[in-house]
Image (cartoon, rainbow, N blue to C red):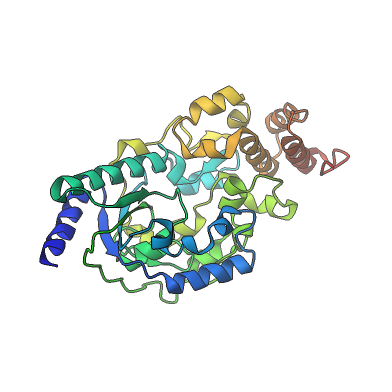
């Protein structure tokens, strides 16, 4: 075990050299998290994220997903850009489109996966071949419970991972391995009596401490949902066109968060404070070009227009907004047309129908 202890210490050093802010080691007992997951799924709180049910307990049993797994090497990497438009100011200006801060730069999946593979390669250089697999929000993995067990923080009342010295503005990634590394101890939960995240949630998606109903969550509605956004929730979305950071913005622990030093996470194409009407005017080619290598591209052009139509419906009435919406009212997508009509109805009255059969 002495050799494994030294290896664990070396892995931490190599991880820091690769740009990770913290490395921790977890065992693979996720029985408590599995019970919570199954209850959450049974309640239907995952909405239309059918992939959450597809793998069932493989998500909570690492050795079932990757046979031979004994430990999970968990890593976190800060992502908040040092140069970014003031988030509160963007949210307060209904003519601008708000994009969750994690998606402003290069797709984190690619960045994290590449670094984790380099870390695994460095381990092989030191000890020879070992049985491993790298994950970054790309497979049925319970990232937050694993990171919590590995001492990278605690799961807060908003269900995001929190760290006393880093807040929650960071990505997580894992290496499943057969190496019998010493495990790290979990840290204490420091949410206390605070429920700022519960109180701030625009749609009431945080239904109680540590309880999230994805069906109400703006991140789910603007990123995961592929059909119509429920009409009653549209006014609550405001100008958020990709994700929502409200529960993180209000969290006291994010006062201690650090900005990233990773150039890959720098803001691209001015998307930290872009005009809604400008974004709505993008052609599909422009969308694909300007979101290349970005997490935003995964929602596709149609949902991009759907989301912006909702935001324009929530914007102050103006000739510019009405003209932008009217330019899309005959769009080839029924999904876009329906959301455009809803938005126009908010500004100039009922356009004969608020939904399309």
- Residue drawn at (43%, 40%) of the image: 85
Asked if 143 appears above or below 107 in the picture, the reply is below
Q: Position of residue 156 (x, y in %)?
A: 43, 67
- Residue drawn at (58%, 52%) of the image: 220
Please give left or right for residue 66 compared with residue 261 in the image: right
- Residue drawn at (45%, 48%) of the image: 138
Out of 7 and 296, give the one closest to the viewer.
7
Q: Where the N terminus falls, by quadrant? A: bottom left
Out of 323 and 101, give the one closest to the viewer.
101
Q: Position of residue 350 (x, y in %)?
A: 85, 42
Please give left or right for residue 107 compared with residue 151 in the image: right
Residue at the bottom extreme? Answer: 193
Asked if 89 appears above or below 253 in the picture, the reply is above
**Which quarter of the picture shows residue 201?**
bottom right
Q: Position of residue 172 (x, y in %)?
A: 37, 53
Please give left or right for residue 289 compared with residue 30 in the image: right
């Amino acid at each position: 075990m002495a050799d494994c202890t030294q290896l664990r210490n070396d892995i931490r050093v190599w991880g820091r050299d690769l740009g990770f802010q913290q490395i921790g080691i977890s065992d693979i007992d996720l029985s408590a998290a599995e019970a919570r997951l199954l209850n959450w799924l049974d309640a239907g709180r995952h909405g239309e994220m059918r992939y959450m049910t597809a793998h069932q307990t493989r998500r909570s049993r690492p050795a079932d997903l990757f046979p031979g797994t004994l430990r999970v090497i968990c890593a976190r990497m800060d992502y908040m850009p040092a140069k970014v438009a003031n988030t509160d100011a963007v949210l307060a200006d209904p003519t601008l489109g708000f994009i969750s801060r994690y998606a402003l730069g290069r797709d984190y999946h690619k960045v994290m996966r590449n670094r984790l593979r380099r870390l695994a390669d460095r381990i092989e250089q030191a000890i020879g071949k070992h049985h491993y697999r790298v994950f970054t929000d790309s497979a049925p993995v319970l990232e937050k419970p694993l990171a919590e067990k590995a001492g990278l923080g605690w799961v807060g009342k908003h269900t995001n991972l929190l760290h006393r010295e880093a807040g929650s503005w960071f990505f997580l990634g894992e290496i499943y391995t057969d190496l019998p590394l010493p495990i790290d101890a979990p840290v204490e939960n420091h949410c206390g009596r605070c429920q700022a995240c519960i109180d701030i949630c625009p749609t009431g998606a945080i239904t109680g401490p540590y309880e999230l109903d994805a069906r109400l969550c703006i991140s789910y509605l603007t990123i995961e949902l592929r059909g119509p956004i429920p009409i009653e929730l549209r006014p609550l979305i405001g100008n958020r066109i990709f994700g929502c950071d409200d529960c993180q913005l209000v969290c006291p622990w994010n006062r201690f968060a650090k900005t990233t030093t990773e150039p890959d996470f720098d803001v691209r194409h001015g998307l930290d404070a872009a005009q809604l009407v400008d974004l709505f005017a993008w052609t599909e080619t422009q969308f694909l070009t300007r979101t290349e290598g970005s997490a935003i591209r995964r929602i596709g052009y149609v949902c991009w227009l759907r989301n912006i139509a909702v935001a324009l419906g929530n914007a102050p009435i103006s000739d510019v907004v009405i003209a932008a919406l009217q330019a899309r009212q005959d769009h080839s997508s029924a999904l876009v047309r329906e959301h455009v009509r809803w938005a126009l109805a908010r500004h100039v009255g009922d356009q004969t129908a608020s939904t399309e059969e």
